[in-house]
Structures are given as structure tokens and as C-alpha cells.
Image (tube, rainbow, N blue to C red):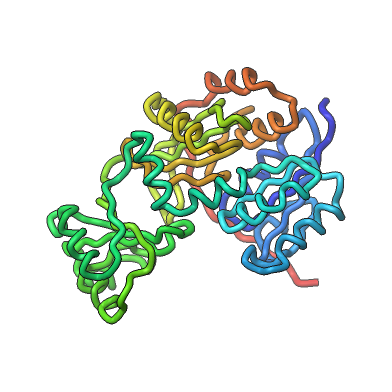
Amino acid sequence: MLNDIKVLITACGTPGFLPLHKQLSNVTERNIEIIGVDMCKNAGGRFVVDKFYQVPPASDANYQEKILGIIEQEKPIDVVIPESSLEIAKIAQIQNRIDAKVMVNDYYTIKQFENKLTLYKKLEAIDVPIPKYFEPFDLDEFENDAWRLGYPKKKVCFKPCIGKGSRGFRIIDDKKSELDILFDERPFNPHISMDTFSNIFKDIQMLPDLLLCEYVSGTEFDVMVLANENSDALLTTVKERKTSKYGLSWEGELVDSPEHVELSARIVKELGLKYCNGIQFKSNKVIEVNPRLSTFLYGDNFCEPYIAIKMMLGELTDDEVREYQDKIPIGRKFIRTTDQRFFNDN
């Protein structure tokens, strides 16, 4: 049996936390005590963790000191895992004050590439396939650039240069009528007409920082890369995304795709990323790079976050992590489900 460890995981109300908690709880070679924190007092993880703390939002000035206080109170903590995009930069900024391994990239790396324009320019420079894109300054440029991308014959899309999840992402497709969107689609439908966009911004002199991109069709792939501190990709899994809801992968399958494995290894190395990182592709074009944990597809004795934990604690060498590449349960599928918790307030 290995030594027992204590792991603190933030954002324990996120959709990926409960399956992660279950996998770590099912580890048989040691006991893992899990401390969960979240800004919501009734976060789903509160009901399954060994101990729960409510914290302010990551945007709050007291967030970092609150996290440091919890770590001090619960010491010794072995590993800290930030799960939310909103928190990773905040925790990276204080990781030298944390007496534990922190599964986070360097602050400078996170800040540099959280801007999608900076990210796309970097990927373009290293010859990684990305969508065609423009950075329009005003409405006139936006409309002209859309035409250059093939609109209205082709769909185009836009998203904020700095944004989380699917916030601000829209597809401009005039083949979908406003009536159909209103009555036949759910409220989170991402489609919008050019007229609607133009009416929103007609009296605004300068657009917010956003990217206008070609709409890339094709199969979606979610790639998770586990890298060492030298940004060498040691274990890479490729999931084909079958369906999406709310901007999340809802149904998927582990597939064998050497092309995506090779591309992802180059990206991680060139961007200087370490530990667990997610890369989203459409066909072979990179759509997003998320320098944090994302959706995993677990198998029997195959849990990427736990492999990462053991690597960070010095319990697995680089070569031992690489051996897991041949153990990936190709063909294993997943479907996301929802659940409920019932409780009385104390």
C-alpha cells in the first residue's frame, strides 16, 4: 500500500467533479482524502467530499487568501487541483506560497494564451492548423471580413478573445430564421443572424475584442495531454465528441488518432504547458486550448488525473507514464448524465 494522501480540488460543483471524485475514491492502493471547495455552498461536490469549504468567486479580492487559509488549516495537503478556468490564473499566481504540488501551469503561460488571438497567432507561427480568422475593429470591418470568409454562402462564427466556455460564442447563419430559432431551438442555441448582430452593435463605435472565424465543420475531438515539467507529452488521449450540450461534451468515445496525438504534443511543447491540458479540435484544426483538467473518459485502472498525481509526487517516472499510452481503453464510450441531491439545511 502507498502512503495516504490529501488532495484539494476547487470548483467541486463543476460537471466533471463527481466522476473525478468517484475515480479517486475507488483507488485501492491508498486512501485519498478529498477536500472540496466551491463558491456555491450547495455545490454538488459538497455532498461527497471528506470536507467542504465555501470560497468567494475567483474574481473576489479575498479569493487567494481564502484558498491559502484552507490549505494552511488542512495541512499537510499533497496536491492542489484547480478545476475552473476562472481560478487557474489566480492559483498559479500564488503557487509558490503553497506547500503542496499544484496541478497548474505557470501564471505567465496561462495569461499569455488565455487570449485566443495570442493563441492563434502562436499556433499559426508553428504551422498548426487553425480556422481562418480576423480581428475586426468595428461593425464595417466585421461585415467586410465576414464576406471575405465566404458569408453568406458559408457560416461564420465569432467569440471573445478572452472568454470562458461557450460564453459569447455565436454562429452567424442566415439560413436559420429567427422564428425557427425562437420556437424550435432551446434558449442556449448559438445561432444568430447578421441583421441581429448588426442591430446590437450599430450604435457602438468600437467592437469588443473578438475573433471572427470561419465555421469549421467536421468531427469534434477533445484531446487530453499529460505533460511533465519540461512540456514533454507523456500520455495523450483522444475522444471523439459525439454530442454536445451547454458547450460540454455530452457523449463521446476514446479513439486511436496518431495525427491528433502528434499535433497535441507539438502544441504542448511549443506553448510550454505542463500537467493536464485539454485541446479541442474540429477535424484537424485547433479550436481551443484549455490549460487545465477537462472531461476525462475513465477506464478500469485508467484514471489520467490519478496518473498525473502520482507523476507529480514522484511515484511514476516519465517512462512509466508513457507506458500508459498502450493501455488506453480505445473504444470505451461515455455519456454524461445528471443527478439530484436531497438535503435539509442545518
Q: Is residue 191 left or right of residue 96?
A: left
Question: In the rendered image, which quarter is residue 189 located in?
Answer: bottom left
Q: Is residue 32 left or right of residue 279?
A: right
Q: Position of residue 19 (x, y in %)?
A: 61, 45
Of the 4 image quadrants, the one containing the C terminus is: bottom right
**How many numbered marks, from 0 up?**
0
The residue at the point 75 percent across, 44 percent down is 7
**Left or right side of 172 for 115:** right
Seen from this angle, which residue lies furthest bottom? 203
- Report whether residue 246 is seen: no
**Residue 98 location, x and y as percent?**
78, 48
Q: Residue furthest left?
A: 153
Q: Visible in this render: residue 164?
A: yes
The quadrant in which the N terminus is found is: top right
Residue 158's x, y, as percent? 32, 59
Residue depicted at x 43% and y 62%: 167
Q: Residue at x 46, y 45 (%)?
A: 289
> Does residue 2 sit above or below 51 in this rendering?
above
| Residue 42 pos. (x, y %) | 68, 65
Q: Is residue 207 above or below residue 94?
A: below
148 shown above or below 325: below
Res 229 quadrant in image: top right
| Quarter holding residue 316 | top right
Q: Is residue 2 left or right of residue 267?
A: right
Q: Looking at the image, which residue is at 33% across and 57% down?
A: 211
